[in-house]
Each structure stands twice: as structure tokens, then as C-alpha cells.
Image (cartoon, grey):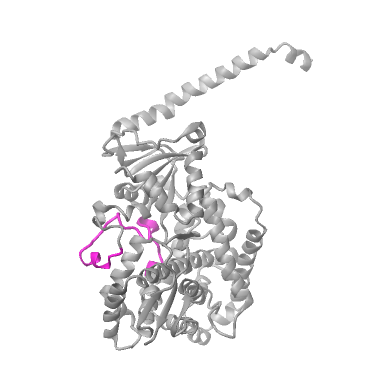
Amino acid sequence: MANHIFANVSLPGIFAAAAALLLISRIYWELTTGAQRRRLIKENGCKPVKKYPHKGLSGKLFGYDTMKQNFQAAKQGRFHEMARNRNFSHQQHTIQIRNLNRDIIITIEPENVKAVLSTKFNDFSLGNLRTLTMEPVFGNGIFTSDGKSWEHSRAMIRPSFTRQQVGDLSMYEHHFQNMVAHIPKDGQTVDLQELFFRLTMDSATEFLFGKSTNTLVKGQENPGALRFTDAFTYVTERMAQDFRTARLSRFLPDQKRKDDSEFIRNFAQEIVDEALANQKDIEKGAEREKRSYTFLYELLKVTKDPYTLRSETLNVLLAGRDTTASLLAHTFHELARRPDVWSKLRAEVEELGGQPPDYETLKSMKYVKWVLNESLRLRPVVPGNTRMAIRDTVLPLGGGPDEKSPIFVPKGTPVTYSVWSMHRRKDFFGDDALEFKPERWEKLRPGWEYLPFNGGPRICIGQNFALTEASYVMIRLLQNFRRIESRDEKPWSEFLTLTMAVGNGVHVGLYQE
């Protein structure tokens, strides 16, 4: 009977029925979503955003031409500068580019960035790319979650970054002394960047876990801690590749990534399990008085869930370790090439009389602050970021030939903001915007055009932690060494993990006399 029924259905009839269904669905979309979008565009005076002139059919359909450029530039350590010259070299500040199966909007317009991160915060999310890439290793924490889950994470974590916790500089001094022991005093070449990453891993793990990796303690090297540090770098480097390729790179075989990811999770989980097992002892008054402040043990007051504890500590470790180390690396790469800036810094530091600064003194040192601000401007440690529109919305600028009109952003559209390129706009930072010039900060009071730690509700909760540690380490290095020489004349290049470091390292010679 069934065969008889299907035998009477012709192939043209099937196609006709399918075409009719498509036509009906299209008419329905036009009457509902389409009409709503046209009304939104008209009410806001939206005009089309400029489109990148892709080359060839593969470029126009999938953005293959720009993706190829991205791969090549990333290999050469110049991805962000290439993208700046490609996307914004004709005085345009917002552009639409094809990327695989969708269009993305890239902007360096501060008003658009402000809308995405603040005034229209609820119209955007992190998007599933970040979650799919990071959650398998770092879990569901403050940097991988959205909505209520993110609000809960932030509420748990915020108390750990108060002035009282961040202002205790004794921990920094301890790890600084461990690092200085690895630096030759007679000008022999050393890679400071490698030491900075080990330093911030040691200090961050002590602050977060109450147990430092101690990778800088001579004679007490812990193979597990060293493996954790190396695994952390490798996995985050592969994650950055996932972001650049829309996760196409995940199809490449990479057993090391799998092994390192598992090692990171297990390493952190062992510490969490130990804290849970010792919980009763930790909560005793006498025991608490002996213990210095520890992020993990403060979290135990809020939750006992092992997965949450592991996720939040790994999320904060990701930010606390990488941003500070990268900031220090970029700064000393510049200082080794700028004896004039080094001399001005030393003049300010010498006013301390050789004594380590306390928190209030550290915050009052203007030239130290200017140098770090300029380093973050010219070499932002997070050079770009992306949000996904979760509903049809509008950005204030970028439309029309003069880019002065609003633009319509359909639901599901990624909006990328390039901090690297925005920080190089001459209309904001002067004709010398490509130069390292700390003195510009004497009068400069930027708004949304300067975004080293993000902005809006998701502004980096640990920025004071990072700036305090970076300031302290820089001051103490200048107190310990009178002179610095560059030992690598290669031009600066980028090393991209989830943050940006110096591609060639920071090879210098330091002299005490």
C-alpha cells in the first residue's frame, strides 16, 4: 500500500512542494523578522557598513583571502599589525569582513566599543566560540561564562581583589628575590620574558592556591610545577589558534594538547581536593591566623563544589599570570632600547633610597605609571576581543560613506574590536602614536579609546593586582641594576596565546655597576 502511494508521487511534485514551503517560510520571515528589522533600521537611521573587497569567489563566499593573510601573518608574528593596515588603512574605523559562513563586523570606533561593552551590554554575549574553546580546560568560570552564571562568578571573586588583599607586597618581594637569583649581575645575556612568566606563575599560584609552583626556587624545582607552567603556555597558544581559525584547527591531530589539558585539570584538582580535605582545620581560628590570604580558601566560604573551585581558580590564574608577565616583557623590551626612558625611571626610583616601596608610595610614582600606561597602549596584552549579538541591535557609528550613521547588527553577528588598532589612532594619541612616549600621559586623559583591561561590567577585575605586581617588579629591578642593554636587535614581533607576549623574548644584559 505504502509503495503504491509513493509510486504516485512524482519528482517534480516533490520539488514543487519544497519550493512552495520555502516560499511560504520566506513570506512569513518577511512579515515578521524582516518587517521588524526594517523598522529598527528606519527608526535608527541605519546605513550600510563598508564591506571589505574580498578577492575571488572563495574570498567573497568564505573570506578565504583574508583568512590566508591571517595565517601567514600569525606565523610571522605580525598578525595584529597586518590586520590594522589591511582593515583600517583608508581612514575607516568600522568594516564588515566575511569569515567562513558569516559576516563579522570589526571596529576601532570607541562609541561602538562602549555600546558593545556597556550601554548595550545585554545585547551581546561572549558567543559559543569562547565557551567551546576554553571550557574543556578552564571550566565554567568568570572568563568563560555569561549571564547569571557570570554574575555569580564575579560576585564570588570580587572580594578577593580589594585594596587589602592586593596591597600586601610582601609576597611579591619573596618571589622577586627568587627571580633575581637567576639574573647575572655582570651583563651576561638573560631572557627576562621567560623569568617574568615563571615569576607570575609562582606568585599567582601562591595567591590563588596557597601553594606556589616555586619554579624560580633554585635547588627545589618541582617537575610537576614546571610541567604545569609549560602545559599552560602550550594549551593557551593552541586556544589562540582556535580563535583565529574559528576552531578549524581542532581537527588537526595534537596529542600534546590533549595530554597537557588533562595535566592542567588534574594539577589544579589535586590542590582543590587537598583544600577540601583540610577544610575543617583551615576554618579553625588559630589555623586561619597563621595562613596568609588565599583565594581558594576564601572561595570555600561560598562554595564546596570541586568543579566550581577548580574553574574559578584556573580562570583567574589565566588572567593573573599572563597579563602581568606580558606587560613586564613588553616594558623591558622597550626599556632596553630606550636609555632615555630608563634614566628617567631610575631618577624617580632612586628617590626611594633603595627601600622597597609600600603600596601608597608605589601608586604615587608618576613616571612608573606613565611607562606602564604607554606599554599597555602600544603593546596591549589583550590586543583584540569579540562579542556576539544575541538579538538584533544597532551600533552608533560606522554607517554610510562618512561612517557617521548608525549600523544595523543582526542577531548572531560577531563584533570584534581591535584594541591594538584603536590604540594607534593618531586622532586620539597624536601623530607620534606609533612611538613609545611615556610623557604623553602627563596630559592624556583617554576614555573608551584606551582599553587595556576591557570596560563596562566585564572590566578586568584583577587589573589593580596586575598593575601593582608589574609596578613593584619594575621598581625593584631598577633598584637592583643600574644599566640595561638589549642583546637582540630583531624587530619586535608578537607571540600570541590568549594574550600577547614578545615573539623573540626579551634578551638583555643587566649591570649592577
In the image, is residue 213 above or below residue 416?
A: below
Give coordinates of residue 191: x percent, y percent. 48, 73
Position of 42 relative to 224 (above/below)? above
Q: Is residue 133 visible?
A: yes
Main secondary structure type of the part rendered in magenta: loop
Rendered-image quadrant of the C terminus? bottom left
Residue at 57% across, 62% down: 234
Does 437 appear in magenta?
yes
Q: Which residue corresponds to the image point at 28% horizontal and 39% vertical from the top-left?
A: 403
In the displayed structure, 349 sits above or below 135; it is below
> For this rendering, which residue is in front, 328 or 24?
328
* The image quarter in which residue 440 lies: bottom left
Residue sitting at 32 percent across and 71 percent down? Answer: 338
Instruction: Decide if residue 443 is on the left or right side of residue 423.
Output: left
With respect to residue 304, does 188 lie above or below? below
> Which part of the image, by quadrant, shows the N terminus?
top right
Asked if residue 211 shows in the view, the reply is no
- Of residues 409 and 236, which is closer to you in this image? 236
Q: Does the magenta stretch include residue 126?
A: no
Coordinates of residue 157 in the picture (x, y in percent)? 45, 66
Quadrant in which residue 162 is drawn: bottom left
Q: What stretch is highlighted in magenta?
A: 436-464
Query: What residue is shown at x 35% (from left), y 72% (from top)?
Result: 335
Q: Which of 198 and 124 is in front in this view?
A: 198
In the image, farthest residue toward the left: 443
